[in-house]
Image (cartoon, helix red, strand yellow):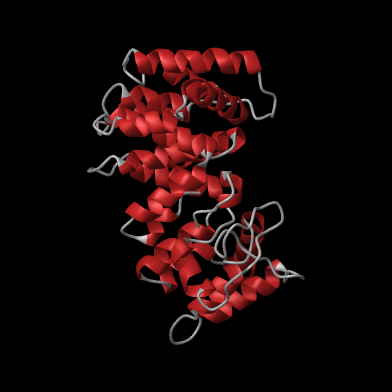
Amino acid sequence: MCGWCCCLECIHNIPPLNLLFLHFSSTPGREGEEGARTLSPMASISVPDPVPSPTEDAESIRKAVQGWGTDENALIEILGHRTAAQRAEIAVAYEGLYDKPLLRTLQDELSSHFKGAMTLWAMDPAARDAKLAYKALRKKGGDRHAWVLIEVACASSPDHLVAVRKAYCSAYGSSLEEDVAACPLYKEPLKQFLVRLVSSYRYGGEHVDGELARAEAADLHGAVAAKKQPLHGDVVRIVSSRSKPQLKATFQHYKQEHGKAIDEVLEGNRNDKLSAMLKTAVWCLTSPEKHFAEVILKSSTFSRLLLF
């Protein structure tokens, strides 16, 4: 899992870790989907060739949940080996055949952590991220709940973040940005930083301005060297607005010029909560596999890893 490909679009097609442990323990070495880098046996999923029709999958799911007990392995074989788009087609077919939403069936027939993991996995990715963000804004204790907001804002594409904001507004009757701003769990300047992240729309192309990268690397070093509040001014502006390729170039210049990576500098300031959150954002933007590996190490429940 530590070798996940560096984009949440690929993570959207990775089964929950607890499902993977159940399934891949007996079938190691599965190849990833097209477009994903297969860096470990659990780095991605395999889709059967040929893929059964949505109707066939819906019928197989129905069979798995009928009778005494649920065939969890069958559900993993089906839903754990379908992309987000394919799972959406299965959900439509299932409701058409049985006049009951697939998610409702999973909620009724499953239990414990498997129920939570499978229902989240079967959701539309934008709706799932909206739900996770909503819950994160209402959970007390620990800063790791803020990680979910940073992950949603930084590890996904700009268009996906827009879709999450739309799904959030539709589901909960308020905007994600205003709920973050009103959340009593987060104090300034962390709250300001989170608002900037979830309300941003980054350039999604590959163009990089080399001169800008050098200039902003100097701005970052100036803020760190002067021991300025890390989430104010230029630092929050750069991290919350620049494209991922632009930020990678900026951070590369920072390391070349000053001999140390920006995340290492932030990691060294262990007593500063804000620096820790900024480091999380840097990782999610440029190398999310590092962040999600840390999530695995610190997680007490595998379903915590459903950060899609």
Q: Looking at this view, is 271 or 204 the one in front?
A: 271
Residue 94: which quarter of the image? bottom right
Residue 233 placement (x, y as % from top left): 40, 13
Report if residue 175 is visible in the image: no
- Residue displayed at 25% across by 31% down: 184
Front residue of 107/17: it is 17
Considering every residue shown, the one lying at the far right of the view is 50
Q: Is residue 207 above or below residue 112?
A: above
What's the residue at 33%, 43% (across, down)? 145
Figure quadrant of residue 97: bottom right
Q: Is residue 145 left or right of residue 263?
A: left
**Image point (50%, 49%), residue name:** 308
Residue shown at 44%/87% (left/top)? 68
On the rendered structure, is 162 left or right of 279?
Answer: right
Is residue 55 visible in this depiction of the protein? yes
Residue 22, position as x, y percentages in the image: 47, 73
Image x and y of residue 188, in percent = 28, 22
